[in-house]
């Protein structure tokens, strides 16, 4: 079943975070068994941009408060920006923290 929000954080193998050639960007695993819906803003009221497959990992460029969501990793109003105009609820991304793990989106 596809859910409205989630992101990935780290991979199941325990490997080190991945980095790009120009800047270090940590990726996080999406909750196991979740097809995560990516929204155009920090709420399920925003349009669906795409759906991430099970086992996906996502970068978190910034985080912002939005709609409160209950998911695999608890209840939170934190939404992760994973790309230009792409947001997922932090409730489905394994960041290892209940709070912000990067700067707030401006």
Image: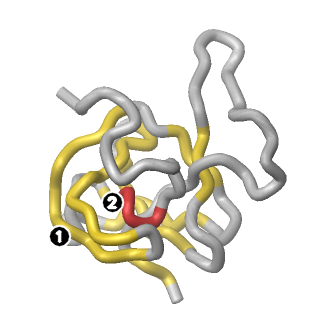
Residue positioned 56% across, 54% down in the render: 8
Return the residue at label 1.
45
Q: Is residue 34 left or right of residue 85?
A: right
Taking the spot 60% from the left edge, 40% from the top edge, the residue there is 27
Q: Position of residue 16 (x, y in %)?
A: 76, 34
Q: Position of residue 62 (x, y in %)?
A: 34, 33
Q: Which quadrant of the structure image shows residue 71?
A: bottom left
Residue 69 location, x and y as percent? 26, 71
Query: Which type of secondary structure does the marked residue at label 2 adopt?
Result: strand
Q: In the rendered view, how is the structure colored? A: secondary structure
What residue is rendered at 41% in x and 60% in y? Answer: 38
Residue 58, above or below 74: above
Residue at image position (35%, 66%) is: 48
For residue 82, side relative to residue 25 (left or right): left
Question: Residue 6 versus residue 15: which sits nearer the camera?
Answer: 15
Q: Counting other residues with Cα less than 10 Å from the Cα at mark 1, is it few (<14), some (14-19), or many (20 or more)?
A: few
Measure the C-alpha gap from mark 1 to mark 2: 8 Å
Residue 27 drawn above or below residue 73 = above
Q: Nearer the viewer, residue 106 or 39?
A: 106
Q: Position of residue 13 (x, y in %)?
A: 83, 53
Q: Is residue 97 left or right of residue 45?
A: right
For marks 1 and 2, the one nearer the N-term is 2
Q: Dot 2 corresponds to which residue? A: 39
Q: Quadrant of the C terminus?
A: top left
């Amino acid at each position: 079943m596809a859910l409205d929000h989630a992101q990935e954080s780290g991979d199941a193998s325990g490997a080190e975070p991945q980095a790009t050639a120009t800047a270090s960007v940590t990726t996080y695993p999406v909750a196991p068994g979740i097809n995560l819906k990516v929204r155009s803003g920090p709420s399920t009221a925003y349009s669906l941009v795409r759906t991430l497959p099970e086992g996906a990992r996502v970068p978190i460029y910034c985080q912002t408060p939005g709609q409160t969501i209950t998911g695999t990793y608890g209840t939170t109003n934190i939404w992760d920006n994973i790309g230009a105009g792409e947001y997922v609820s932090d409730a489905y991304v394994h960041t290892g923290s209940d709070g912000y793990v990067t700067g707030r989106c401006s």
